[in-house]
Image (spheres, rainbow, N blue to C red):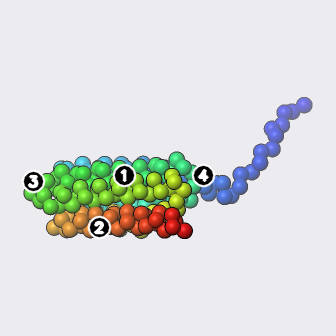
Amino acid sequence: MTATTPPTASPSPGGDRARAASIGARLAVFAGVLFAGLGSWAILDLQTRLGGVLVGASGLGLIGAGILARRSATRLDLVLDSLADRTFDATVLASIAWATRAAEPATSLGALVAMAAGFLGAYVRAKGTSLGYGVVESPRTRGLRYGLITAGLLVDGWVRWTVWAAAGVSILATLVRSSQVAKEERA
């Protein structure tokens, strides 16, 4: 008599796609955070072009992570994605602020304002979502922020205005998220 293994149910194609998206999101988060850290190191070493290349790679990874996290729809992937975005802001923008603090205080201030606005926007989104409001974050907004910061690092003299533009984008995103909550509250 030979032992047979019971047949296993074949996984659904949708489940396979969600699992693949989850694995992809986590790998993209790891890569994005790694490149953000390396980019920050280059910025602090005053190698802004190298920093720009690494920060650009980080941004691409984190945009991909955000898209894949939404496809996987697991809470862990969504939290990791949000944490990675905050890590990008904290490492890259803080590095720009530190590296420019003496020579260009206005640039340093812009980087700090952009970082604070990004954290405030994330807070509004998280708080609104936890209270049951449909607060959404667009990958386009992230892409614009990442692109502005990358361009500022790659092109001489641009960082002084791109950090302020990134701050403006983050402030506008925060206002839009707040208005989403207000509209839903009135409805």
Q: Which residue is mark 3?
A: 102
Q: For numbered disc 3, what is the local secondary structure?
A: loop
Q: Which mark is residue 86?
A: 1
Can you tell which of label 2 and label 1 is closer to the viewer? 2
In the image, taking residue 62 as reference, residue 20 lies left or right, namely right
Q: Tell which of 64 and 88 is nearer to you.
A: 88
Residue pictured at 37% horizontal, 63% vertical: 174
Q: Amino acid at mark 3?
A: Ala
Q: Which mark is residue 176?
A: none
Image quadrant occupied by the N terminus: top right
Up/down of 55 relative to 156, above or below: above
User: Could you tell me how far apart the alpha carbons at marks 3 and 1 are, in whole angstroms?
Assistant: 25 Å
Q: Which residue is mark 4?
A: 19
Q: Which residue is mark 2?
A: 168
Residue pictured at 45% horizontal, 53% vertical: 127
Q: Amino acid at mark 4?
A: Arg
Q: For numbered disc 4, what is the local secondary structure?
A: helix
Q: Quadrant of residue 118?
A: bottom left
Lower position in the chain sequence, tag 2 or tag 3: 3
Lower position in the chain sequence, tag 3 or tag 4: 4
Residue pictured at 71% horizontal, 51% vertical: 11
Image quadrant occupied by the C terminus: bottom right
In this rendering, does residue 50 appear at all? Answer: no
Residue pictured at 13% horizontal, 53% vertical: 101
